[in-house]
Image (spheres, rainbow, N blue to C red):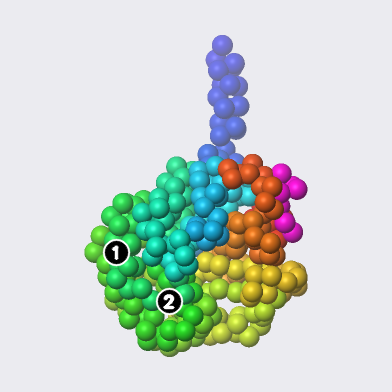
Amino acid sequence: MNKLFSLLMILLLGCSASTDGRPASQATDNDIISPLSVEGIQLVDDQGNPIMLRGVSFGWHNWWPRFYNAGVVKWLKEDWKANVVRAAMGVEPEGAYLDNPDWSINKVEAVVEAAIEAEVYVIIDWHSHHIHLEEAKDFFKKMATKYGNHPNVIYEIYNEPESDTWQEVKAYSEEVIKVIREIDPDNLILVGSPHWGQDVHLAADDPIVGYDNIMYTLHFYAATHKDFLRKRADYALGKGLPLFVSECASMEATGDGEINQESWQAWYDWMEENQISWLAWSISDKDETCSMLHPSASSAGKWQAGDLKEWAKLVKTYLNR
């Protein structure tokens, strides 16, 4: 009996340990939600270990609301292996937040709450091209009040400034950050930079001070933005500016045109080398290259191969690496 008991114990212990003698993890990285913070230029978890988020952005909520639901969030996590999603709440177009704030908030909250349930990170994205300060402050006050105690919530306070100077974007950002920090002292905040998220070198020369856990967004479309923008980003990193790629894709900046695999690979390698988090654009079914889905795609995920465009298949391959 003692020998049998000992044998059983050995088998049980062997099943619960890794091959190098450490206890086996009971969850993958995709299942663990840690509070995020910024140390230098690096995003880290609650143990101070570098962490990269890799995922997918939803398209504008006002044009593709059908995908803003728990089924899609769950599918992106389980099938695509995304550990972050981005709720891109349109602000200015007809039918978007400025026209219909309550409905817009409902769509965003559907994604946020699904992400909390699925245990993935989620970016609440003020998807705007121009400054709307008071509306943004009111919106983020509501979001921080409702979701600030969830460590997987990230605030992106200005998607892509189009014509504003860095001084204008910085002043706007400082006011919105102040509103969030009065309620939520520590969740990650993403700050946009001028010229559709490309002028990170300007932010690097004059960064926001006085607040912790903020990063600056860099957006690229690989067929248009090549080595010149990576050099600009390298300059920003060298100046100590933490970067986060909250939107990227492999075609032209218009969102259309051919996929440039060589340029995309160069960007992917650069992000991996620098441990920079990234999200690909976008979950939508528009007739353009960057829209990942055909109109046949279900509104609730569980997409078949025939529902996916070339860009979706490429992103899914990279996320599953």
Q: Which mark is residue 38?
A: none
The alpha-carbon separation of the residues under discs 2 and 1 comes to 16 Å
Q: Is residue 309 magenta?
A: yes
Where is residue 271? Give x, y as percent.
60, 70
Q: Secondary structure at mark 2?
A: loop
Residue located beneath label 2 in the image: 130
Up-down relation of residue 54 to residue 235 (above or below)? above
Up-down relation of residue 59 to residue 73 (above or below)? below
User: Start and end of the magenta stretch?
Assistant: 304-310
Any part of residue 160 in sight: yes
The mark nearer the N terminus, 2 or 1, is: 2
Please tell me which residue lies in front, 240 or 232: 232
Disc 2 vs disc 1: Cβ atoms closer than 8 Å?
no
Where is residue 17? Give x, y as percent.
57, 38
Left or right: 161 in relation to 19: left
Which amino acid does the dot numbered 2 rest on? His
Q: Residue at x 56, y 64 (%)?
A: 278
Where is residue 109? Give x, y as percent.
41, 50
